[in-house]
Amino acid sequence: MRLFPLAKVLTMLVILGFALLSAPTPVPAEEAAAWRQEYDSLCSRTLETESMSEQELAQLVDRCDKLKPRIERLEETERKVFLRRLQLCCDLYKYMLDVKRRPPQ
């Protein structure tokens, strides 16, 4: 019965193939530095939100949305950490934008 070891080998090859296809592609060093600079630029302004105009806040939200796909290409640990941090910054900007757009009571 040599069929069993052959089935095992084929199963392992299929699993390995899926693992290789689903693995994130490595991010070049230049691109890594670029997304990090953009991230630092975006999230360093959270303490200034009260003094920002609606237009500035809207631009920051747009920049967050554009940065998200770049962070999604990172390796798993870094991706999880920075996506969460970016989401927190973006949520703050969205909240302040909503507050500034509300009519005064």
Image (cartoon, rainbow, N blue to C red):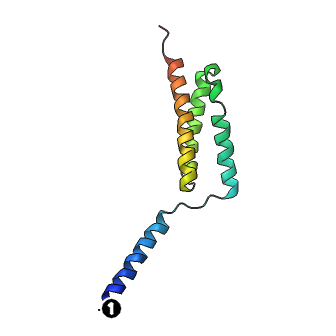
Q: Residue at x 59, y 38 (%)?
A: 63
Is residue 9 left or right of 37 when viewed as pictured?
Answer: left
Q: Residue at x 54, y 35 (%)?
A: 88
Q: Nearer the viewer, residue 53 or 49?
A: 49
Q: Nearer the viewer, residue 101 or 16?
A: 16
* 84, above or below 92, in the image: below
Residue 90 visible in the snapshot:
yes
The amino acid sitting under disc 1 is Arg
Is residue 79 left or right of 30 when viewed as pictured?
Answer: left
Residue 7 at what x, y percent from top left?
Answer: 34, 82
Mark 1, Cα crowd under 10 Å, few <14 / some 14-19 / many 20+, is few
* 23, above or below 68, in the image: below
Residue 43 at what x, y percent from top left?
Answer: 63, 35
- Residue position marked by numbered label 1 in the rendering: 2
Residue 48 at what x, y percent from top left?
Answer: 65, 24
Quarter holding the N terminus? bottom left
State the residue lying farthest toward the bottom: 1
Residue 65 visible in the snapshot:
no
Q: Residue at x 64, y 26 (%)?
A: 47
- Dot 1: what SS? loop
Residue 9 at what x, y percent from top left?
Answer: 40, 82
Q: Residue 15 is drawn in which quadrant? A: bottom left
* 75, above or below 11, in the image: above
Q: Residue 37 is drawn in which quadrant? A: top right
Q: Residue at x 45, y 72 (%)?
A: 16
